[in-house]
Amino acid sequence: SRSCQNSYRVKIVSSGKFGSCSETDTKANIMDKNETTAPKIPPSSDFEANTSAEINMVKQEDEEAIQDPDSAGSPKDSKEGLQSSNATQEPTLFSDARGNLKVVNTIVRHPCKVFWFMIVLCLFLTFLLQALVFATAEGGSPFTEPGNEFDINDVRSIQYDSLRLARDVVSDARGELESSSDTKQVRSEVADVLYWVYESEAPEGVFGSAEAIEGMKDTFDIFLEDEEFSNWCTLDYRTALAKNATRDCMPPLSPLAMYYASTWDSEKVAVMIEQLKDPTKLNILNDLAGCLTLGLRCDQLTNATTQADVAWVTAITTNITSIASTWDMKGSLVENYTQVTELASYLLQVDIFKGLVDFGFDKGFDTDNPVSQFSRGILYFGGPLENQTSDSDADDSRKAIVFDRYLEEMDTEADADRFSFLNSYYFMGAIIGDVVLDIVVQDGLLAVFSFMFIFLWLRINTGSWFLAFVGFLEIFFSIPIAWVLFSVVFRIEYFGTMNSLAIFIVAAIGADDIFIFMDAYKQSKHRDPDNLVDMETRMSWVYRRTGTAMAITSATTCSAFLCTLITPLTSIQSFGIFSAIVIFIDYALVMTLFCTSVVIYHDRFEDRSKCGCCCPCGTISPSNTENARVKLEEAGIVGKLDGDRVSRFFRNQVAGFVEQPLSRMVLGVIFLAWLGVAIWQATQIEATKEAEQFLAADHPLQKSLTILNQEFPTASDDNGLKVYYAWGLREVDRDGVNLLLDPKYYGEPQFEESFDFNAQCQTELVSFCDKLKTDPAYKELIKQRNGVGEVYCFIEELAAFNVNGNLDDCDSVRRGDWKQQDWHVDASTLSAIMDDFLSQKTCFDPDGTDTVAARYMNEIGWDGSRLRYAAISTESAFLTPFSVESEDNTRREYDQFLTIANEANSIVSQYCSGNVVVTDLDEKFVFMNNQAIYETSAIQSSILGVCIAFTVLLISTRVFHLAFFASICICAVLVSVVGTMVMIGWELGSIESILIGITAGFSVDYVVHLAHAYEIADGDTYERVEEAFADLGISVFNGMLTSVAASIPLFFCQLQFFAKFGTFLCLTIAYSWIFANFGFMSILAGLKIPIKHNNCCSL
């Protein structure tokens, strides 16, 4: 046939001899359906003559083509290095004599072998990941445990690790001194708590009606009225037990104990309220009560104090103590419940009794406003359980009893429709894990919908289930292969949970690459017939056309993600590196695995859908490439893309719209107006001033946490953030620390060898403790309990033990009676008394169960032979270990604690030697610095990402104005995204900062693709615009549509990181597409700057 003759001519010219067609070529080119007989091969002598004549004829045609360049093919194809069917050239390392890529030749000639080799390779690397990473992961999880995330060179992290690592060293040296579970008293400790949080929907508040109070009581009655709960509650060991008696459960911590007191003397309460209404008497009570009851602040008493004042203070404190002793939640609702509320409002003004009531009333509750819109309560579950074998077994048992016996009633009480005037929320350690797991599963299902949409759109775009499946498989394989390179090859051990976002990134970018490759394959059938000589030539054209464009975008995106290396935070560094590797692997798989699948699709599946063939039924004959060549030759179209309907739409309608001056003017006005608004909004962004939420605001768990963090003051029974002041330590040695390669090694702790726990050092430490407890200047900074600052000062109990030989008389210890004697401890005798001292029950534990070793485990630096360091700690009145405050709020508190440290250090260090280390062990101060890093890194990463995009574009296109305008477009996307964040109410927290930092990496693809397509096109400006839209308009549109649609399910995620990531992804992709198509291309069409490649860079 004529088609096979053409094929033969190419082989003759390129190889110098007659070569047989491959199996596919033979079926595609020789077995023409229109031919009734196969061509007959002449005898050998005749064949050689014919061959010689054929060669001479081809050479003559080639010489004529050289003299007439227009007849040799389109200039554009020459520019792209695509050779005509008659052309020959010197073979290179990458191309053969016909100019076809050697790697493409291999794929086309052996598609099935290459395909299965790639599949087996991907599966092998996935298995390698399982064997070398997953199977050896500590605890079965390949993710690095969250925590200890900080800049290792920051002073906060240095001081944090200086104390934390030193504590671990001395603790290991002396061994654990806490008793084992079998020696602890049964259910003497709080093993878990059930937290109830209440919100009023009525103006009179949660205590404004009997119905509301009874509604709150119902939540506790689920347990208190069940006899089985007595086998699970925390037992009350604060009082001695009578013979043959059983211990009661620890009463719930709730203001309901007042309203359901076993007895209530309304007359006595009324008298006390009237006395407390007198400001003068209230001041006297606060001045004297601390000294008379606790032996504190006695030095602050004035000579104006009278015996009558002392008698009155003694009487009223006795009365209040007597009344409070009946608050046990065992009675019925007090008839005059408004009197209970009024008493609570006045007790809040009494320093030593404030702790009785401050837990259950909100910030706005006081004598002027005796209305609390919120309340809370805690129910205690005890441990160790009787016959307990392990803590984990006990946890499982508690979880089982809650699920089996109580959870249904708890859900009923917490139902939103239970009361119209009251909302109840709960959470508990035993079940919160299941709640969070349910949330993760639900969010994961939403993510599945995103991936399903991507798969279906791949199917619609490619027109093949086979290509859609391989494309989706290629996207999936990018993750494990990148993980192997990341963890096994590069030996990076830090793999944070943030790295899981890479699956969404590669899904969006990988789909884009598949669309671009597939659209180029489709467009190749409408191009020059010389590109359709055979499949090798056709795929070489596709490979060159898409490979360069995708290489540029992949390199730019990878570089933008690697910009995260400028941050000192390991999790973000790990995320940036892993994402860059994933994008690179995705590019490699598109150019290999997906390219191979396209060849298989061409040979076996294309255009067979009409006959229902969905399995390898043999190769198609004649091939689609041959049919496309014949159609183009018959139509006489050479070098011009006619294309399909969608391509014509982008070439004619979209490009035509951009080419209209009026359209560009309207677009310019719209873009400038929008950018003005976006820039103004972006400048208004502020760092968050509240604790960051990890769930949706309307989720019951998040609502309860938000109420707890925002609506209540830090009460006496709350755990405040412990701030430590330690002497005897030096800064941790960070030599050899690289958390990416070894996330468990933070350095070596250093001790101050000159530390001296002498008598004067002890005196100054005790004085420092007293100052923290009683100085009025610290009242708003340090959490108060019974009118005294909450301070952990082991020297006080050590001194009392040294004087008395035990800690049995706790009243004497707390009053400081030991100060009347020579209490100083000889440092040389510490080894003789320390073990006994550490095993004593502390006098400062409200529950009366903690040992000295348990209470002061972080403060006492005893290593079994010497005291390596000594620390004093105090609790913050504002910060807590459980919530994350804004940077401004945390820094305000930190600066105040640091001021105290500097003042104390100037005195204590003179006698103890060494400088003070001030830190917390809950990472709030180091996270405060992390928040500052998030903000600066977001700005730095964005700027660096834009600069990298400009550099890559300038190098790849060698056209300055293309690189410059594309960078302007990326900046516009960045500003638009940030401005929209502000408009929808986002503040600059850790999540937002991370997302802004990677915006440049996400926003480069579309503008880079169009810039590259514009640069390689031929003709004047309008022709280049039309060619760029025709080539890549549909590909870019498909990529945008896929990413935006896939991000929409993430909007409904309960986990805020994924919800915000979905919003961010949608905004970034949408703005990128809009500015690339209508901003960038309009600028090029309007300015009409010519492209010349005479120099390295063209203006």
Image (cartoon, rainbow, N blue to C red):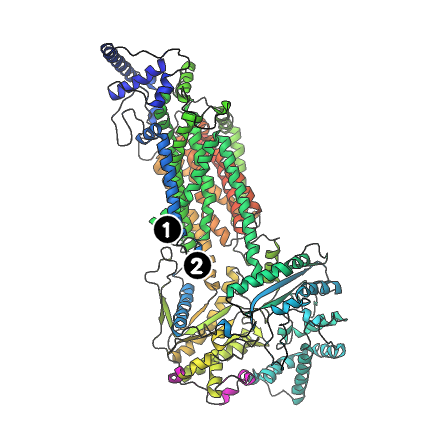
The quarter holding residue 557 reads top left
* Residue 200 on image: x %, y %: 69, 60
Q: Is residue 377 magenta?
A: no
Q: Quadrant of the C terminus?
A: top left
Amino acid type of the residue tagged 2 in the rendering: Glu
Q: Residues within 10 Å of mark 2 (few under 14, many from 20)?
A: some
Q: Which residue is mark 1?
A: 132
- Asked where in the image residue 719 lies, by quadrant, the reply is bottom right
Looking at this view, is 544 or 937 the one in front? 544
In the image, what residue occupies the spot 48% across and 48% down? 995
Q: Quadrant of the N terminus?
A: top left
- Residue type at mark 1? Leu
Which residue has dot 2 on it? 149
Residue 610 horizontal side relative to residue 169, left or right: right
Secondary structure beneath dot 2 equals: loop
Read off the magenta span.
806-831
- Which of these two is toward me, 121 or 1068? 121
Circle 1 Cα neighbour tier, 10 Å, few/some/many (<14 / 14–19 / ≥20): few
